[in-house]
Amino acid sequence: MIPYKFFFSFAFVDTLTELLQSENVIVDLNRTKLFERTEAAFYCLHESEIISLKETANVVVRELLNMEPNLCKKSQTISIRFDDSELENDGRDVVLQAKDDELNIGINWNLGVKYRHVRILRGMAPNNRKCIADIGMEWFGAESSQRYFDKMQIVVDKLSESLGKSWNSAFKDKVSEVYEPILDILKEEIRFVCDTYPEAPANMIRKFVGYYDFYEITPIARSEKVRVAAYNMNGTLGNGSCDYINKIQYPTRLIEVGPKELPNGELSRTMLALVFDNGWEIEMRIHNASLKIGQGGLVLDVKMVGSPHGIYKKQLMREKY
């Protein structure tokens, strides 16, 4: 089954390649097996879906060329990477890179909620700290406290007593007995690390949003509109050609971390909300990775929910074929 976002990526890459080649730009397209499977599946879609995807791709490509005019330099070779998820800390769906490395442009499709799945407890066993994720190093590039490991070990030992059992048979209320204690430990440790290490807030954004700048493309449901946002944290987008694409600032401090407030005013028992300065906000939701304890451990779904200050956004109208 081909994820639907790959169809957006294919339509975009196909449209961009055609336009660049019409400008005599050499395009080196990385035709992986995934690309070829997506291409075959794309042309099996209903005709109306293909037209809709191409309309979206066309308006996005034309706007991209306005923002990145250096893409059309006739003397360069553009390499296009199609969703290579093997690259660490690079969640970009499509990457455009000039042969001379002067350009390195990422495109991400926002087709609903975009999560990063992070395992905080792996396969569990008594007295085995290897199952506990070192969130300090993995999220912030800083040391976790001994207090964090000690408290998490208590939870691991408790879970180890029920290895192989289903979550529902092992606990009357897994939320109050397991989830909430872990979220309390995470909340305390996140606060500790961010207060102790000045680079921790920025490193957390790099971990969960990405190390590289990118354009986020959001087709707006039930409309002909498409939204473009430029996540230009490192100043690589626009390449000096667009003065309206601002460089946005990483966070420098954690303002608040605690249970997420739900629409009804109650506090979530399974979600944490993290609020940083410069407009960045993150949410985390805890859940078990499998029906039985020990098979996959516990996972956090992490998503960004706050738009950084100064981010460039533009709404486009799709052009009908």
Image: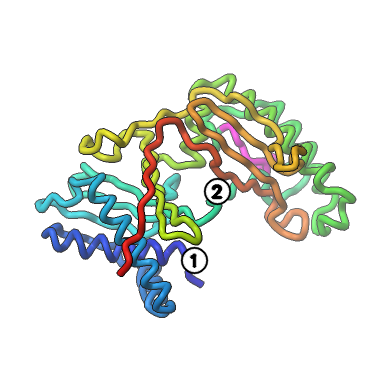
Q: Quadrant of residue 57?
A: bottom left
Disc 1 designates what residue?
A: 3
Q: From the viewer's perspective, tell me whether residue 291 is left or right of residue 256.
A: right
Mark 1 lies on a secondary structure that is: loop
* Magenta span contains residue 166: no
- The image position of residue 155, as x and y in percent, is 79, 40
Mark 2 lies on a secondary structure that is: strand
Q: Residue at x 75, y 38 (%)?
A: 265
Disc 2 designates what residue?
A: 116
Closest to the observer, 78 or 276: 276
Against 104, residue 146 (above or below) is above
Give the magenta range: 129-136
Q: Residue at x 88, y 57 (%)?
A: 169
Circle nearer the N terminus (2, 1): 1
- The image position of residue 121, as x and y in percent, is 68, 45
Within 10 Å of disc 1 (Cα), the crowding (few <14, some 14-19, many 20+) is few
Check disc 1 and give the amino acid type.
Answer: Pro
Q: Rounded to the nearest whole Å, what is the CA distance between mark 2 and mark 1?
A: 16 Å
